[in-house]
Image (tube, rainbow, N blue to C red):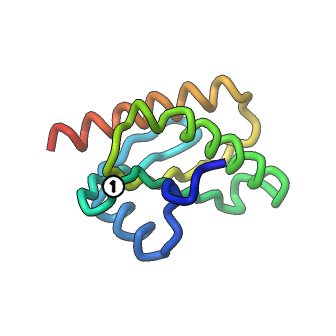
Amino acid sequence: MLARENRLIKADDFRSTMKQGRKAGSDHLVIYLKRDEAQPHTRFGFVVAKTVGGAVKRNLVKRRMREIIRELLPELGNSFDGVVRALPGAAEIDWNKLREELRTAATAAANKVAGS
């Protein structure tokens, strides 16, 4: 479970992160990342549409992504806002493949943000 200070909650935060953030993706997910110096913590939100599957599959994907991001928070540093959007097929891949894809995409997005 992500700590409260590490969660994106407001719809405006989701919108601005997806609109202004740098995007990186893989076969089963897309991550949007933007620097937000006003925030002392890195915050993440998750979007899992019905195209991924039924409610059980969507919740499974969200739980997995939350845990993977929780592990990655120390590597990413502070003052980021991020949104992870699951694509169709994310519920069918195993834990290790999802973790590797999310880690690679998060690193790529962080490098894009640092480069701009």
Q: Residue furthest left?
A: 116
Residue 12 in which image quadrant = bottom left
- The spot of residue 87 in percent (x, y) is 60, 48
User: Could you tell me how many numbered marks the image carries?
Assistant: 1
Query: Is 70 or 34 nearer to us in this picture?
Result: 70
Identity of the residue drawn at 62% across and 46% down? 66
Q: Which residue is found at the position 38% from the left and 36% from the top?
A: 76
Q: Is residue 51 left or right of residue 38?
A: right
Bin the neighbour count of mark 1 within 10 Å (Cα to Cα): few under 14, some 14-19, many 20 and up. few
Residue topped by disc 1: 40
Q: Residue at x 31, y 55 (%)?
A: 21
The residue at 34%/68% (across/down) is 16
Indicate left or right for 43 with 63 as reference: left
Could you say which is closer to the camera, residue 75 or residue 60?
75
Q: Position of residue 90 (x, y in %)?
A: 67, 41
Q: Is residue 35 left or right of residue 45?
A: left
The three-letter code of the residue at mark 1 reads Pro
* Quarter of the view holding residue 116: top left
Q: Secondary structure at mark 1?
A: loop
| 102 with respect to 32 (left or right) | right
Image location of residue 61, percent across then percent down: 71, 46
* Residue 57: percent from left, percent from top: 80, 50
Residue situated in front as seen by the camera: 91 or 33 = 33
